[in-house]
Image (tube, grey):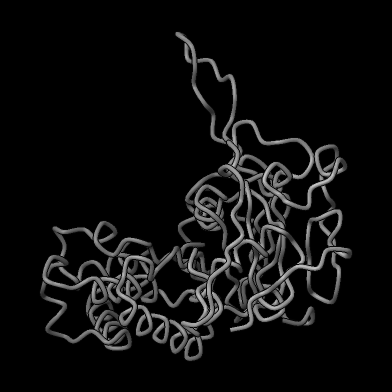
Amino acid sequence: MQKEQPVLVEVKNLRKFFPVRRGTFGFTKKFVRAVDDLSFTVFRGETLGLVGESGSGKTTTGRLLLRGYAPTAGEILYHLPDVGTMNITTLPKKELWEFRKHAQMIFQDPYSSLNPRMTVRDIIAEPLVATKSAKGEEVSQRVIETAKRCQLSIEHLRRYPHAFSGGQRQRIGIARALVLRPSFIVCDEPVSALDVSIQAQILNLLKDLQAEFGLTYLFIAHDLSVVEHICNRVGVMYLGNLVELAATQELFQHPLHPYTEALMSSIPEADPKVKMRPIKLSGEIPSPIDPPSGCAFHPRCQYAQALCAESRPEWREISPNHFVACHFAESLQLKGFIG
């Protein structure tokens, strides 16, 4: 992606700390630093992927961008066409409802994210009713139109979620997010609970909807093969912050951070004759309650030096639109994935 592209979402020094209650009187002793000083932009019309291990802060970031969580610090700016710039971190409740017309979410689990007591028609219509975006017959028309666009039939609208497969339920979830015609959608691992054949159908549907409606996606995933297929740029998260950000093919072929290299080494090769040689990281991701000093990845990094434990690496642009936080990014010869 080029810098000249218009920015839709701008995240500045975003933090989210969850208090840990301890002691008889519930005093706050420590905090879970789920997102710690995160900054990035999302360009209008692109799909930006976020990848990383469980616990890296991907889902928390997605919820923060929709004000599902109130941030501890930082700014989230939306530059919306015909609306202007909105800083959603400071929006009062009434204006926040207005903002939700422009940004929605597709959830990971298509089974638990749908109300079993509501018909499909009512599930899809709920955002319209809640935000007072449509009334009466207009609601029904928007629901039918959106359902058809998500490859659901009119007969489906009278049924309840238990009557559908996982793939069909996810289409219902997509229709619910799409019915308001938002500019921005957070996709929180939308295909991880689905069979591989169904995953391809859902991904193709998301791409078609993006082309038709000019949607912008933040695509959270752990499956790098899926990310390579759908994303224009990819950000790699580790312990609440970005360690690398670049165009998809650039990141996959020329990783600059050791953690990115380790992730790439775990992607299965298409050739069955090629043996996988994943890089085995020592230990597990550190606790976000007490993160390591310096570079958060240094206790698990095979290239770590004394400086890595002493100083936090600067977030910098190594090559055009390729950012990384590593002291030795220029000198390391890391292996990427050539699919």
Q: Is residue 231 left or right of residue 11?
A: left
Q: Does residue 257 lie above or below 158 as drawn?
A: above
User: Could you tell me residue 22's position as x and y percent?
Assistant: 49, 17
Q: Does residue 144 lie above or below 122 as drawn?
A: below
Q: Is residue 91 left or right of residue 296?
A: left
Q: Residue at x 33, y 69 (%)?
A: 128
Number of callouts in the render?
A: 0
Q: Residue at x 84, y 45 (%)?
A: 305
82 or 18, nearer to the observer: 18
92 or 205, nearer to the observer: 205
Q: Residue at x 72, y 81 (%)?
A: 1
Q: Is residue 55 left or right of residue 161?
A: right
Q: Does residue 20 lie above or below 56 as drawn?
A: above
Image quadrant in which you'd find residue 169: bottom left
User: Could you tell me residue 207's position as x and y percent?
Assistant: 47, 85
Q: Residue at x 60, y 39 (%)?
A: 286
User: Could you tell me residue 292's position as x and y percent?
Assistant: 70, 36
136 or 298, nearer to the observer: 298
- Placement of the C terminus among the 4 image quadrants: bottom right
Q: Does residue 141 lie above or below 110 as drawn?
A: below
Image quadrant in which you'd find residue 36: top right
Q: Is residue 150 left or right of residue 161?
A: right
Q: Residue furthest top?
A: 24
User: Could you tell me residue 5's position as x and y percent?
Assistant: 73, 81
